[in-house]
């Protein structure tokens, strides 16, 4: 019955789709194209174009920006390209364009196109080139494009939100060669299984978004055609992955990862990038030194255009990133050393530092914490932090306030604890109404900090990896709205939240990852695990969850039905008709068999009920005879005598006329047996 219903539904759906593709049932190509002309601005635009009006004597294939696959007549010609870059067109993308099933190119670059990308456009199966860059698009980036020939997807310079592609079954992944999504509002992480499907990818640009997590080095490094990778100005954490440069596959020419929160060192494997011309890593949290073999005149050569080739001050590593203990206006050449020697390097340990050298004190770190987490709310509890910030903040303060003992005031702040040398070793601001983000200055300004409790507040942003420079043994950020992932270098701090037991380190001991929770917001030393959560919150360290059951979990029945549906859909229409016929014959046969069987049973039952009672009394005193329905009450089952029904007839009582009859007992005897 299920198969029958599914086949019929699928056939009806096929007919419906066939009718929808019929131009007489839906809009014509002219009507679909004219749906781009919207409002008074659209009418003014169409008046300046060749064609583009319902009364135009020109064929749509002769309109400005339209290319067709020519047929025997105009009605058989198919629109294959709409190319109107920087044409002054204003409006939205109409759903009617989904009727142009032969469309291969759609280019409205640089126009005033608002709204979202309709699913009808993403569902076009012949689309090869989609360019909607530098428009005013909003809404969510489609997760799937149904064209298996899509090679160029240019959606940069818009306001698109949502996640980067995370459906590894999308047909466009295997054919895509260039993806440009820079300058949008994308969030989430870069999905490794999706990247692995992009075997033809040559260019990936995700610059200037809000993408978090780590760089999937293995997945990106496995793409043997990848030459241009732009991930700058996001919220990426973790190390520069060494496996991004895989032996025999390293063809990257341009690698931009500046302005993130990456940590660790620059891998020596990047020497394999023998075709590298652009490499920017400044404004991160990277330490160490660059491998000399990675530096050369061919990398970032634009920085040295005005410097003679024989200049002594030329340092080829400086045009990748300024070394630790120095600073540059853009984090690259020219670089200036920070004053203070080795002490300055401790305060300025990062490669590619921008702006000015750092000289952070405890006071600076605490004032920055207060200002960064005040937001639009006032801290609850004592007002001593307000007084402290008022006394010591301000650009003109130089430490000359003789009326206040700075260290005493710091150690007297509510929630702050100090050791005997007045070094801040603990900050506990749980449930104090903090709003804002955790400043990275805490890490460099409070080197003796052991305890940091900022739980149950309204903090947002990301967890800074700079906290690794402290002496933390306890960190609690649970119950906030912090995004991203725990920076891997924080996970490697021994003894932090009992981490590192038996040389095993867990990031969930710092905070439960997004999509999980428990009562304390992190993996407990007593074995308390982080539990999956399905409420869609992208925050780490969650203590509560509104949806604990996976909505995608299906029962065995549902999975079976889904399998049947997919099986039916994969069968051609002709075979589905044959399947329906076979099922009809089978259904009639089963019904007939059931009816015949039921009739035979009813016939035998009537015959049995009409049979005379020929049972005779048994003269044996050891056996008792009783009526049907009567049952003696015996306490011991072993004492029960063998019972006989009145209709029971012993085989020995039958008289057979021949030996053959004796071998074939009568039917009533078989029935009683």
Image: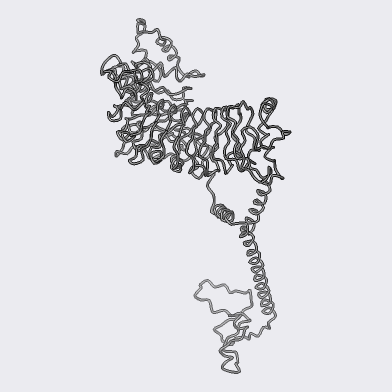
Farthest-out residue, front: 72
Q: Residue 431: give x, y in percent of width and height.
A: 46, 25
Q: Is residue 146 left or right of residue 580?
A: left
Q: Residue 506: give x, y in percent of width and height.
A: 36, 37
Q: Quadrant of residue 356?
A: top left
- The number of numbered discs placed on residues in the rendered structure image is 0
Q: Residue 664: give x, y in percent of width and height.
A: 58, 87
Q: Is residue 467 visible?
A: no
Q: Quadrant of residue 342?
A: top left
Question: 476 and 586: which one is in front?
Answer: 586
The quarter of the picture where the C terminus appears is bottom right
Q: Is residue 34 visible?
A: yes
Question: 374 and 19: which one is in front?
Answer: 19
The quarter of the picture where the N terminus appears is bottom right
Question: 456 and 566: which one is in front?
Answer: 566
Q: Residue 23: give x, y in percent of width and height.
A: 69, 44
Q: Is residue 568 left or right of residue 416?
A: right
Decide: is 580 above or below 340. Answer: below
Q: Is residue 443 left or right of residue 551?
A: left
Q: Is residue 212 left or right of residue 617?
A: left
Question: 506 and 117: which one is in front?
Answer: 117
Q: Residue at x 39, y 41 (%)?
A: 222
Decide: is 488 above or below 403. Answer: below
């Amino acid at each position: 019955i299920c198969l029958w219903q599914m086949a019929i539904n699928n056939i009806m759906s096929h007919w419906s789709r066939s009718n929808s593709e019929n131009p007489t049932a839906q809009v014509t190509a002219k009507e679909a194209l004219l749906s781009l002309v919207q409002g008074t601005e659209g009418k003014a635009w169409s008046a300046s174009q060749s064609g583009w009006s319902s009364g135009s004597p020109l064929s749509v294939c002769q309109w400005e920006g339209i290319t067709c696959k020519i047929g025997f007549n105009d009605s058989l010609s198919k629109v294959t390209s709409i190319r109107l870059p920087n044409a002054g067109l204003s409006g939205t993308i109409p759903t009617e364009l989904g009727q142009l099933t032969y469309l291969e190119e759609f280019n409205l670059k640089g126009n005033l196109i608002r709204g979202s990308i309709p699913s009808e456009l993403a569902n076009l199966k012949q689309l090869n080139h989609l360019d909607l860059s530098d428009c005013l698009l909003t809404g969510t980036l489609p997760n799937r494009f149904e064209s298996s020939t899509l090679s160029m997807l240019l959606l940069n310079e818009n306001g698109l939100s949502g996640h980067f592609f995370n459906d590894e079954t999308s047909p466009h992944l295997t054919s895509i060669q260039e993806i440009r999504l820079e300058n949008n509002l994308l969030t989430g992480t870069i999905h490794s299984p999706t990247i692995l499907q992009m075997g033809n990818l040559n260019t990936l640009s995700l610059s200037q978004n809000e993408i978090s997590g780590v760089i999937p080095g293995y997945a990106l490094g496995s793409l043997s055609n990848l030459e241009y990778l732009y991930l700058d100005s996001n919220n990426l954490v973790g190390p520069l992955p060494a496996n991004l440069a895989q032996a025999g596959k390293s063809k990257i020419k341009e690698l931009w990862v500046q302005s993130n929160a990456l940590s660790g060192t620059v891998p020596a494997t990047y020497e394999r990038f023998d075709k590298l011309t652009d490499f920017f890593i400044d404004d991160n949290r990277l330490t160490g030194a660059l491998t000399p073999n990675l530096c050369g005149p061919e990398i970032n050569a634009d920085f040295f255009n005005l410097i003679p080739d024989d200049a002594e001050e030329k340092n080829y590593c400086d045009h990748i990133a300024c070394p630790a203990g120095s600073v540059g206006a853009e984090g690259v050449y020219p670089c200036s050393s920070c004053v203070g020697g080795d002490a300055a390097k401790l305060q300025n340990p990062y490669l590619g530092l921008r702006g000015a050298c750092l000289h952070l004190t405890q006071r600076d770190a605490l004032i920055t914490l207060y200002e960064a987490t005040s937001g639009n709310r006032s801290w609850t509890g004592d007002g001593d932090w307000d007084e402290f910030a008022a006394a010591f903040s301000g650009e003109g303060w130089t430490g000359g306030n003789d009326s206040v003992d700075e260290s005493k005031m710091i150690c007297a702040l509510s929630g702050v604890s100090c050791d005997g040398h007045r070094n801040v070793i603990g900050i506990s601001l749980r449930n104090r109404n903090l709003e804002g983000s955790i400043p990275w200055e805490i890490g460099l300004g409070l080197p003796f900090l052991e305890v940091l409790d900022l739980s149950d507040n309204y903090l947002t942003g990301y967890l800074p990896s700079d906290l690794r420079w402290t002496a933390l043994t306890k960190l609690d950020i649970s119950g906030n709205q912090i995004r991203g992932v725990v920076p891997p270098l924080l996970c490697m701090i021994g003894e932090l939240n009992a981490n590192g037991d038996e040389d095993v380190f867990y990031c969930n001991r710092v905070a439960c990852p997004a999509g999980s929770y428990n009562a304390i917001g992190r993996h407990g030393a007593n074995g308390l695990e982080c539990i999956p959560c399905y409420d869609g919150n992208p925050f780490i360290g969650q203590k509560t969850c509104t949806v604990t059951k996976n909505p995608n979990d299906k029962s065995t029945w549902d999975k079976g039905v889904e399998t049947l549906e997919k099986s039916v859909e994969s069968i051609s229409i002709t075979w589905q008709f044959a399947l329906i016929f076979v099922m009809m014959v089978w259904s009639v046969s089963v019904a007939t068999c059931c009816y015949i069987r039921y009739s035979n049973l009813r016939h035998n039952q009537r015959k049995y009920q009409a049979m005379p009672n020929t049972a005779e009394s048994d003269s044996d005193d050891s056996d008792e005879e009783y009526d049907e329905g009567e049952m003696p009450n015996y306490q011991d089952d072993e004492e029960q005598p063998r019972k006989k029904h009145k209709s029971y007839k012993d085989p020995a009582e039958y008289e057979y006329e021949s030996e053959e009859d004796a071998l074939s007992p009568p039917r009533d005897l078989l029935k009683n047996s």
